[in-house]
Amino acid sequence: MSQVKKKRPKTKSELHPRNPHRARYDLGMLAASYPALAPYVRPNRFGDESIDFADPEAVKVLNAALLRHYYDIEHWDIPPGYLCPPIPGRADYIHHIADVLASCHAGKVPTGERVRCLDIGVGASCVYPILGNKAYGWSFVGSDIDPVAIATANKILEANPHLKAAVECRLQPNPAAVFTGIIQPGERFDLAICNPPFHTSQQAAESGTLRKLRNLNQEKVLTPTLNFGGQSNELWCMGGEAKFVQDMIRESLLFASSCFWFSSLISDQDHLRNIYRALEKAGATKVVTVPMGQGNKKSRVVAWTFLSEVQQHEWREERWG
């Protein structure tokens, strides 16, 4: 039976207006920038040029092509099994959190290396520092509890000299800590970002992967091959996303004057109620929730600050001009 070709929109209108990935992938253009992509490009069941998104290697090569074409990353690679993040969604976080900064800076996004961002869980891909530095010139500190992830991210920085001066990766020695051991005395960050582990267990992570693969293949899949990869600490932790973010909120209070805006991606809307309660209990002076979406997937960024209006004004004057 022949497949009925779906009408697909030319742009992903739900993505941020400044996100360069709103248009559908031009795989010919990407393969011209990154020839290693070409062997993976083939017609899908609707006759459109595509790649097999259930193939981890194809997904990784597509990411490398996107990073070269849009972000001037000449050399990018991650070890087998490590999380290969979808670039459009990660870029959306960067652009939306830039708007949060702009909201307290007369509508103008602060740019340049003086704007410092802390990426909690930078991962082997080092993706948020890559995107944020290209889009706004920000400098980054990326932290992770995994030595292999830190070593791999450092290899990416070494291979792309324009990034090396703007990004520093730090190993978090205490897996139970988020900011302690990373933010040094007297150190200040304009924002902190985090894409927390979502699942509560390895079994839950594998079940989620099976659902995604069935949707991609339109057939029954029994073995969870991680098309986007992911180590245990990247995909799940005790208590999952809800507990991770609530712990992050409690610890952020200890660094209330070290960071203007703390933030985290929240995938499950049902987690918001307890997260808001934790923020109220911690004494956040302002909380912002930014809805995000890509296709059928809906998420949001929750950002919070402990600074008073006076402290915010002083911060802007001193750091953003």
Image (cartoon, helix red, strand yellow):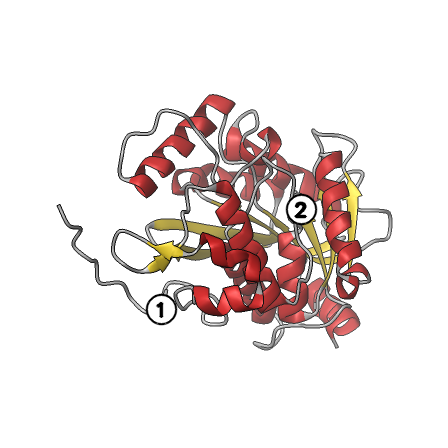
Residue 82 in picture, x, y percent from top left: 60, 38
* Number of numbered discs: 2
Q: Which residue is mark 2?
A: 122
Is the C terminus in the top left, top right, bottom left or bottom right quadrant? bottom right
Q: Earlier in the sequence, mark 1 or mark 2?
A: 1
Q: Which residue is mark 1?
A: 11
Other residues around mark 2 within 10 Å, as few (<14) / some (14–19) / many (≥20): many
Residue located at (37% from left, 63% from top):
14
Taking the image as shown, residue 316 lies to the left or right of residue 268, namely right
Q: Secondary structure at mark 2?
A: loop
Closest to the observer, 235 or 262: 235
Residue 180 in picture, x, y percent from top left: 77, 38
Closest to the observer, 242 or 43: 43
**Amino acid of disc 2:** Val
Residue located at (65% from left, 67% from top):
72
In this view, 241 is above or below 284: above
Residue 60 in picture, x, y percent from top left: 55, 48
Whether the residues at callouts 1 and 2 have beta carbons within 8 Å, the answer is no
Question: Which label is found at residue 280?
Answer: none
